[in-house]
Every structure is written in structure tokens, then in C-alpha cells.
Image (cartoon, grey):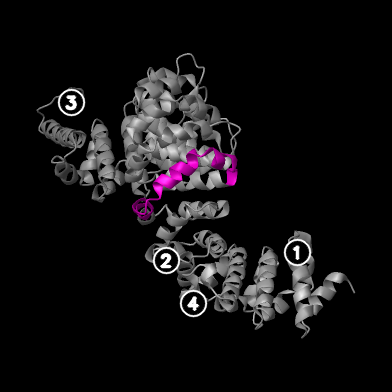
Amino acid sequence: MGGLEILVNLLETQDIKCQHGSLAVLLQITTSSEMRRYVINLGIIMPLIQMMKHPARDLQVLAAETMANIAKMRKARKQIRLRGGIPLILDVMDVPDVILQRSLEDLNEVERELVAVAVGCAKVMDSLSSSPKIKEELRRHGVVFLMARFLRSQHTHLIIPMMGSVQQCADLKAFRLAFEQMGIITDIVRHLQNEDVKLKENCALAIFKCAPNKVTRDMVREAGGLDPLCKLAQSEEVRENKRLLAAVTGAIWKCAMSPENITRFNQNNLVASLIPLLQENEDEDVLTNVVGTLAECCQDPTNRDVLRINNGLPMMIRLLSATYEPLLENLPLVFKECAENEQCMDIINDSDHIQDGVRLIWSLLKHPSNIIKRNTCLALVPCIKYAKDSPEMVRAFVGGLELTVSLLDSDDTEVLSAVCATIAEIAKDPENLGILTDHGVVKMLAGLVQTEDDNLRANLALAIAHCCEWDRNNYEFGRLNAVAPLVNYMISKNKDVLKGACIAFYHFSKEPLNCVTMHTCGVVKHVLRLVSSDDPDVQMAAATTTRNIRKLALTAEKFHYKELNSLQDIDYQN
């Protein structure tokens, strides 16, 4: 019989000293993953669960800490869950509030033992909380109330493992909502300023996971959490700890999704302090979070200048050659914001082609990720709109227009919407529109008109509108039955859809056959309603569409009554 088997068997004896000695040894050896695997196969889980019921507190502590080590293995977590370990652990660790609210120095021996048991159980929870099924079971057993009580205790060594469980449970939406309702977000912010590195890391990770919700972002700001996050990100000590730095920058990124938080970040000079982290040899997760933060912060025009003055743009252009997918998802979004700044655009699209930023952005359209394709298209729209000599720049990318049109074959609605926005911008130049037409853009756009998605409808309608202005494209859209379906867009409540459709009808109305189709489908009542729109472009498009349809009708009537001698005399647009 092997030594490990003897140690496991000793747990089932009735001798406290044997049990204590065995647990003391097992606690040490289960720090090894290989040893954990062996003892799990020897059936250690059930004896450990039974030991948690033992009246001797020191045995409970050893059993809990050994279980915490073993529960790092998936097989052990499953066995603990199936054998009723979860409710037992929660019951054993339920220490009275009067003990939690007093420091260790003020507790007697029995109360200290209770705290030690709770700490051991919290470590088990930390290990168990990586399992989605266990998270759900913990939620059903009301663990959030226990978390709230423990996070407000005086015992840091209890809070540390509990925060580990909190940040892992924050993966689930139900927990995130519960954390907001129970005020746990405020506790997380408070512990962010603790000296313990692991506690700070778990607090930052919890904020990172919860802050996509605006309520959490507001709570973090109101609890004074933004300043500590900035100080941590600016600390040289933190920058040497990449795991902590990644957690902190991730929390900052998600908090930056609120304009109010960006204002506070600006007061801490955050953008300038993050730029040195844009080195190519920096940790990939840190880079991803920093670039995500800059994408949010650069929605404030002042931060675009800060980024430019501190030479951040060339650093980010170099990062476009990276291969880490989450980083490539965020990079185009920074350029999307910065392209609206003329001086930034001069760096992105430098005349000497030293940076060659737009070419590198465009090349991301080849990436297999739909998110990267979508974000790249969104970035290209302002790049094309604001670049100097934009038409020549677009034509200079060999195969760029063909690649863009090919994305209209995508199955992803968001990619289709973004590429339609890009095509609408490209098509404003006649020569580029001719190239798009040669690549079959008309047929591909016409094939998308039956979509029900509002974002796609809005951008598709604009793309169709601008693509009408080349040769026989307008007629082709009518021949391909792309006109009538757009009339259905006019019942939408979405202003962007209405604007896109109205502008498309204006361009369609330059073709007599399309006017007939639109009139037959009842478009007139819709465009008449839009004549009173607040948007001048929509007003003009609606009025001109109505005029063209009416003129065609009058011209047809004159021809019918032989007031016109031949079809050649018809010029209904004048």
C-alpha cells in the first residue's frame, strides 16, 4: 500500500491525532498538481467533506485548506458538488456578524477558531468558483448575502479569498445585478486601496467584469473608485506586476465607457500616463485594455490631441501588425475616433507613407474575426471621409476595393452594416464608384434589401443611394427589385433608417421606371411626411423625390394627351 493511500485512509479513522497528522501532510503535498490528481483518484473528497462536520475546529481548518488545494482540479470540483459539499461549506463558514466586525485582537480563542474555519472555507469557495455549475448552485444557496457580510468584516485574510470568489462569480449576469443591489460594488472599491496585491487584483477584476453595466460604472465613480484606479495604473510598482496591471487597466477600460468617468480620468491625466504602455513588448492583455481605454477616452476630442502630442499614434500604428485578436479588435476603434481630428489624420495617413496607417487598417479586413472586420470598417469610414486626397488614397490600396465588396458575402449582420457604411463613403467619388461597380457591388447590395435589422437597413440604404450615381446602376437596382422593399423601411421608427431610405428614394427618383415602382408601392405618403423632418438632408431628399415623381406623372399625362410629340421630348427632372 502506497503512502498516499495510507494518508487518505487515516482520514477515516476515529483517532484525532491520526486525522490531524494526515491532514497536515496532505495540505503540504496537495500544492502539487500531480499529487492532487493521485489523491482525488484515491477517493479523498468524501472523507474531506465528512471532516468538515468534525467538532474540532483545527481539523475543520486543515480539511478546508486541503480541499481548497484539491478543488483546483475540475474532477474534484465536480465531486464536491455532486456529494453535497456546497451547502455544507456555506453552513460551516456562517460566522456571526459580531465576530466579523471585531479585530482578531479583540476575539477570544473560540472566536478566532471560527474565523480560521471561515477563512479556510472562503479559500475553498475561491477554488470552487471557477466552475459555472457551482456558481449557479452558490447563487441558489444565497451566497451573495454571505459575500456582502464577509466583505464588510475586519479580517483582511478572510476578505482576500472571498474577493477571489466574488470576481469569478461576476462572470454571471445574475451575480452582477445582485452585487449592485447589495452594495457590494462599494465594498469592492473600498478594498481596492488595500495593501494586499492579490486583493487589489481581484477587486480590479471584479470591476472589469461588472462595469459594462452603467449602474456599476456610476457606483464606482460615486464611491470614489476612479482616482485609486488611476493611481494604480500610474504606479511603477504596479507596472512591474503584469497580472495586477492587466486587471487595473481592464477596470479602467470598462469604467471609461461613461462620459462622466472620462471627465474624471482627464483630471488624473490618464491618457498621457497610459501611452508609455503602448510598447510592442508589453503584455498582450495590458495592451488590449490600454487600447480599449484610449478608444473610449478619444471620444472626447481633447484626448485625441493628448494622444497625438505624446506620440501615441505611431505606437498604435505599429501595433496593427500584432496577431493578438482582442488587441486587434480594439485598435481600429481608436483610429475611428482620431480620424476626425485633422492633425491626427495627417499622422495616420502620412504623405511620406512612413506610418502607412490606413493601409495597415485596411489590411485587417482580411482577418477571419467578424468583430475585427466590423471595427475595421467602422474605422475606415472617417479615415476615408477626412483624409486629404481621399479618392487617390483609396485607389492606391491594390485589391482594397475588391476586398471591401467581398465582405458583402458575410453572414454577420454587424459586418454587413459596417461594410455598407464604408461603401457609402467610398462611393461618393465617381471613379471609385466605377471600380466598385466593376466588382459587382450593385447586385450584392440589392441582395441584402430584405433584411430586418435596423442598423443594416440604415447603412445599406445609404450605400445603395450613393451607388446609384454611376452609369446604369440606378436602373440596375430597379431591375434587381431593390426599390420596392425599401418602401417597407419607411414604417420604421429608427431615424437613421428613415434618413437612409429617403436619400435612396431621392436617387432612385432620377430613373423613371423607379419612380413608377415607388409610386405604385405608395412611397409618396411616406416622403411627404418626411418633408417636415428636422434634418435638412432628409427634407431636401423627401421634397425632391416628391417633385420628381409628380413631374413624371405630369409628363406622362401630357404624353397621353399628345401634348408631347415623342419620348425624346420627355425630361421630367427639369
The residue that mark 3 highlights is: 570
219 left or right, relative to 171: left
Closer to viewer: mark 3 or mark 2:
2
Mark nearer the N terminus (1 vs 4): 1
- Tell me the magenta residue range: 217-243
The amino acid sitting under disc 3 is: Ile
- Quarter of the figure with residue 236: top right
- Please identify the residue farthest to the bottom as the structure is shown: 14
Which of the numbered marks, if any, corresponds to residue 178?
2
Magenta span has 289?
Answer: no
SS for dot 4: loop
From mark 1 to mark 2, how far is it between C-alphas? 36 Å
Q: Counting other residues with Cα less than 10 Å from the Cα at mark 3, is it few (<14), some (14-19), or many (20 or more)?
A: some
The residue that mark 4 highlights is: 96
SS for dot 2: helix
From mark 3 to mark 2, how far is it between C-alphas? 70 Å
- The percent position of residue 191, horizontal first and vertical second, equals 47, 56
